[in-house]
């Protein structure tokens, strides 16, 4: 459709949401008037003068909110995308057996059909499994720490929410783009981000998660660290740049 538009003389604009340029966008970049990118460093677009760092448009309800920390119980949000993630789910079931230094409340989005009966956990954990989270804005606001994959949409939302996060990139992602999404997020923000070994599984991943969580639990100042609010949303930046080209 975009190539047809180009042949008809209609300006073409594209957005690359990931830190590694996809095959389709590599082709379209040759005819695009502007290329909007989510990250300052995007593999395949180095030194391309058409690029504009806009960020990735997200749902309007996803907003920066002041971090509220109850040191008696830390809230942790865990999700692996809308379908859940088996690697993450299994590691979390091992994690909650390990004694934390403080009381922890976990909300874990596991994906449809993935809820576990008779979950074994340590008494310091309050643990809730849900198949799907309908209101991610409310879940983000509730949380103090976030554990997730590093897909383009998730990372874009985390960048706005600005809460400490532990990222487990999907190891089979094309061109390992989730790993680079996570690395670039860590580089570009001023809140706590850790990129975990994406090849770890089960108890080994659980132990690494626990070690990183303990660092945050013992230093609640890291939980209170907040980014500056962005002056403009990605959608507004893209809109304004397209309007400039149409003048």
Image (tube, rainbow, N blue to C red):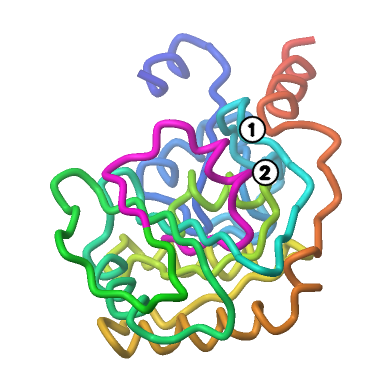
Q: Residue at x 69, y 84 (%)?
A: 218
Proximity of marks 1 and 2: CB atoms separated by less than 8 Å? yes
- Expressed as whole percent of the image width and height from the top left, the position of residue 93 reads 28, 73
Tag on residue 51? 2
Range covered by the magenta-colored residues: 128-149
Numbered label attached to residue 64: none
Which quadrant holds the C terminus? top right
- Judged from the image, the secondary structure of the residue bearing numbered disc 1 is strand
Give the mark, 1 or 2, whose residue is nearer the N terminus.
1
Tell me if mark 1 has few (under 14), some (14-19) or many (20+) residues whose alpha carbon lies within 10 angstroms of its own.
Answer: many
Secondary structure under the numbered disc 2 in the rendered image = strand
Whole-number angstrom distance, CA of label 1 to CA of label 2 = 6 Å
Q: Is residue 135 magenta?
A: yes
- Who's the residue at 22% across and 64% down the image? 86
Percent x, y of residue 207: 40, 89
Structural crowding at the residue carrying mark 2, measured as other residues with C-alpha within 10 Å and reported as few (<14), some (14–19) or many (≥20): many
Q: Is residue 5 left or right of residue 193?
A: left
Residue 137 sits in quarter: top right
Of 128 and 16, nearer the camera is: 128
């Amino acid at each position: 459709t975009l190539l047809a538009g180009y042949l008809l003389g209609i300006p073409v604009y594209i957005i690359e949401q990931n830190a590694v340029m996809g095959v389709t966008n590599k082709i379209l970049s040759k005819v695009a008037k502007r290329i909007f990118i989510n990250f300052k460093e995007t593999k395949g677009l180095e030194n391309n003068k058409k690029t504009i760092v806009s960020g990735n448009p997200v749902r309007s309800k996803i907003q920066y909110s002041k971090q509220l920390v109850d040191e008696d119980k830390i809230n942790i949000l865990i999700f692996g995308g809308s379908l859940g993630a088996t690697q993450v789910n299994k590691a979390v079931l091992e994690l909650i057996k390990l004694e934390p230094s403080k009381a922890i409340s976990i909300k874990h989005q596991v994906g449809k059909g993935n809820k576990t009966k008779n979950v074994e956990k340590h008494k310091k954990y309050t643990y809730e499994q849900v198949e799907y989270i309908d209101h991610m804005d409310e879940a983000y606001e509730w949380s103090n720490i976030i554990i997730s994959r590093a897909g383009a949409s998730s990372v874009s939302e985390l960048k706005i929410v600005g809460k400490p996060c532990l990222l487990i990139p999907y190891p089979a992602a094309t061109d390992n783009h989730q790993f680079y999404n996570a690395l670039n997020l860590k580089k570009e923000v001023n809140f706590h981000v850790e990129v975990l070994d994406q090849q770890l599984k089960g108890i080994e991943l659980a132990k690494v998660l626990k070690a990183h969580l303990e660092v945050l639990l013992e230093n609640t100042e890291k939980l209170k660290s907040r980014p500056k609010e962005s002056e403009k949303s990605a959608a507004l930046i893209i809109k304004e740049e397209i309007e400039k080209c149409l003048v």
